[in-house]
Image: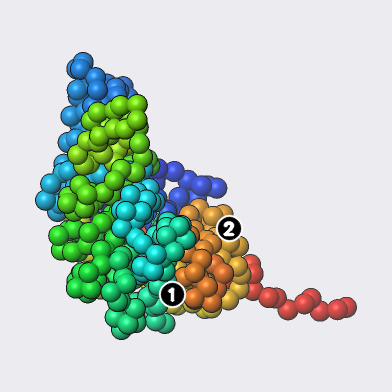
Amino acid sequence: MLAERVREDFPILKQTVYGKPLVYLDSAATSQKPRRVIDALVRYYQEYNANIHRGIYRIAEEATMRYEQSRGKIAAFIGATRPEEVVFTRSTTEAINLVAYAWGRANIRAGDEIILTEMEHHSNLVPWQLLAAEKQAKLRFIPFDGQGILQLDEYQRLLSERTKLVAVTHQSNVLGTINPIKEIAMTAHAAGATVLVDAAQSVPHMPVSVGDLGADFVAFSGHKMCGPTGAGVLWARYDLLDAMPPFHGGGEMIMLVQLESSTYKDPPHKFEAGTPSIADCIVLGEAVDYLQGIGMAAIRAHEQRLTDYTLRRLAEVEGVTLFGPRQLDRRGGVVAFATDVAHPHDVAQVLDQEGIAVRAGHHCTQPLHRRLGVAATTRASLYLYNNESDIDALVRGLHVARHLFSPRPAPAKR
Ligand code: PMP
């Protein structure tokens, strides 16, 4: 099993919590980091810490070279045709805000429509709300059915000549649903709309080629794919980046600055003002090397098998309601559920006492939860290092929670 081979690579998984082995089931929030990623961060600070794109001394040149090398690795990893299509950001959130600000303000006008889905993370929702309010544009939403599958017939009905953008998550961070982006993008393009994909939950977990997706913008976060926090990616078609005005203004994104006006560098540097997260962006390249060494198809296959196991084991626990599609080819390893005995936070707290890390709450998807008719869920999310015994521990923990919270008969009066 893949997990047995790679677990050794993740030092954090060796620890115990409350005397019990740590069972980490929250990789949708952030993934753990392999030793070589941690070592690469230390190596940067110990050996060649310097600001990039400006120093003319050796270690600054090395930092610049490795920063640009990492961009190239990421471009190859997602099948981009050129490294200049990869813009380093802090995160998925920043990447989407970049598009909303720079592309959105230049291209969205009063009366235009932006199509989103009811399963979006707040970071692919709030930036468009801000833009729509500023521009008097309208937001439209593709609903999902009882299985958590997007209703594409509704999408067809929503599309019109007013649609300027379709922004959709590739994989839901709650339902696990993998959306048919290729089909969604083709339909959007036929209607003349631009397409953004929130790939925060897909790029870390499956082979993703931006060419195959057929989108115009793709956003993801390094920290969910074995990389450090502070490094995210916006991939975009070069011609779009070239036509877009800048996002942040400042050092390093300019060609010539005068007191009253400036000219800007070509993409991607036009969008990377100031000192970036140098170490984190460099080390994201190390994470990409690590994932590629294992193989994204192998990671996807492993997670599919383990998702199957998780769904089957959780379905055996009395009172558990599972959300999201049952078909394994339509979903990833994010499993949200509710129990009939306790609030998800209480369940997560009991699990914590058993050394099990899961997330409870609305997972930054309040409208999705409202649609499900629940205020919150407990979420177990899988990655390459999880195995069946992690799921067995989760199931045991849920039995403990059931036992603790189940109503007991009142003691008999004497
Ligand atoms: N979109 C989805 C689908 C996510 O799961 C997340 C992270 N929970 C984000 C966007 C935001 O990612 P970040 O916090 O790294 O910006």
Which mark lies nearer to you, 1 or 2? 1
Q: Position of residue 323 (x, y in %)?
A: 43, 74
Can I make out residue 3 in this image?
no
Q: Where on the picture, by quarter, is residue 305?
A: bottom left
> Around disc 1, counting alpha carbons within 10 Å, would you say few (fewer than 14), some (14 to 19), or many (20 or more)?
many
- Residue positioned 30% across, 43% down in the render: 246
Q: Quadrant of the C terminus?
A: bottom right
User: How many numbered marks, from 0 up?
Assistant: 2
Query: Which label belongs to residue 323?
Result: 1
- Mark 2 — residue? 349
Q: Which one is in front, 165 or 112?
A: 112
Q: Position of residue 99 (x, y in %)?
A: 32, 52
Ligand 1 - quadrant of the structure image: bottom left
Q: Position of residue 310 (x, y in %)?
A: 38, 69
Q: Which one is in front, 265 or 83?
A: 265
Cα distance between the residues tagged 1 and 2: 21 Å
Q: How is the image coloured?
A: rainbow
Q: Amino acid at mark 1?
A: Phe
Q: Amino acid at mark 2?
A: Gln
